[in-house]
Image: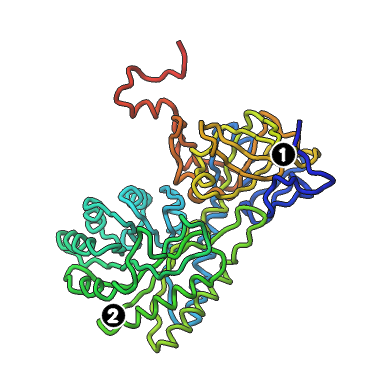
Amino acid sequence: MTTRSLEGLPNPLAPDWLCVPADANALAPGLWPTSATRSPGGELSIGGVTAAALAAEFGTPLYVIDEADARARAAELLTVFQAEFARIGTSVKVYYAGKAFLSTEVVRWVSDAGLNIDVCSGGELAVALAGGADPARLGFHGNNKSLAELDQATRVGVGTIVIDSEVEIGRVAEAAARHGRAQNVRLRVNSGVHAHTHEFLATSHEDQKFGIVLTDAPRLVALIRAEPALNFVGLHCHIGSQIFGADGFAESAARLLDLHAVLLAGGPVPELNLGGGFGIAYTSADEPTPIRELAVALADIVATECARLNIPLPVVAFEPGRVIIGRAGVSLYRVGTTKAVDVSGRQRLYVSVDGGMSDNVRPALYGADYAVRLADRTSTAEPALVRIAGKHCESGDIVVDADYLPSDVTPGDLLAVPATGAYCWALSNNYNYQGRAPVVAVLNGSARVLVRGETIADLLARDAGAQQPFNGGES
């Protein structure tokens, strides 16, 4: 039994944005790494390595990162933003948002491209340092940085610490003084701008855990400036994630620069950090704003507002992550079972794979949508509406809520889900004692492990009550 469209029309169970593809084998433009190709026989290749070869060597689920794609996006973004802000008479600092995906190799990729790196925990800081990052080119975020983390950051010489609350002023000052440093700090503020994104991804409205309200900023900046061990470099704001267009940034920048102008009366404010959150395409219905268009718009916004206020142009900082690493990543899964489910007289085909919310929790957490394609063959079967489900004991364990695959999709098929480079491995977990999947990089026809996968033996090794080592089920 299969799910089929009626006379070429979409299955009425499909969301309004999802169209029946003319070819359910084709790779939708804008979703896949630039190196992704498909052979006449349907074999997907990334970085010159076939998906079948990757699955055979490393198993599934598997995260695959196109190294050349990620490096190129990092370099292009920096080049474009540097050019546009030079056009208006200032410079930029671009921080790679490590929370999207961080490994020691990725640290080297973005550092080679000329980017700084943003971290938000002692663990991320350790990875950045292990990858050879210059501590002076790191930014440290977080709404509840521990005393140990602040000590570590000031001791190694982190370039900038983002102060998120009044209580952190004294904590950072004490740590910096202990290590004989004048620590550069930013103050995170909430501009009150609600980005056009999921509620849980919007990070600059007033009722949330990050930052302080604009009206409190002058008092806190005065407290920062009164600390001999602190050097106030500017404001920081982040209006959300997966944002299309520049309207939200424009309004937020205007409000921030109004405050920036007020703060100039009390001393220098050399920088302004407008955050990140630039969106990417996850499905064929998404139309993200091109990077060059964003850079032009953001530079013009800053120039216009500074001219209005008659203040000097600050150095402007940004923190992109997803837009660099997201599209470079593809996840591979093996189909285990298929099941046609009748819903009000129409059918949806459930396709269950060997991963799920342990390797991509975003659909369950945010309602995120993804696309899917067969990765090891092609088919002339009619497109069927599918829902890609995980293997976990949770009804919300969905990897792809809705897409069309050839209706003959069957157990054993290899599936590929694009645009999984950001926040998938970073949010991965051990639900149902599923080991985290490995991450491999592909480049010029070869593959290498970036992060090793976890085995059941690895998981049991952490269990203090385990009576004996796991032997794989052998007697």
**Residue toward you, 130 or 394:** 394
Callout 1: SS: loop
Q: Residue furthest front?
A: 344
Relative to 323, is 104 on the left or the right?
left
| Residue in the picture at 50% in, 77% down | 299
Amino acid tagged 2: Pro
Screen quadrant of the C terminus:
top left
Q: Quadrant of residue 381?
A: top right
Give the number of the mark in front: 1 or 2: 1
> Residue at left 60%, top 62%?
288
Provide residue 366's location: percent of width, then percent of height.
Answer: 51, 50
Q: Amino acid at mark 1?
A: Ser
Secondary structure of residue under mark 2: loop
Residue 459: where, in percent of width, then height?
A: 39, 29
The tag on residue 268 is 2
Q: Which residue is mark 1?
A: 344
Is residue 94 in view from this perspective? no
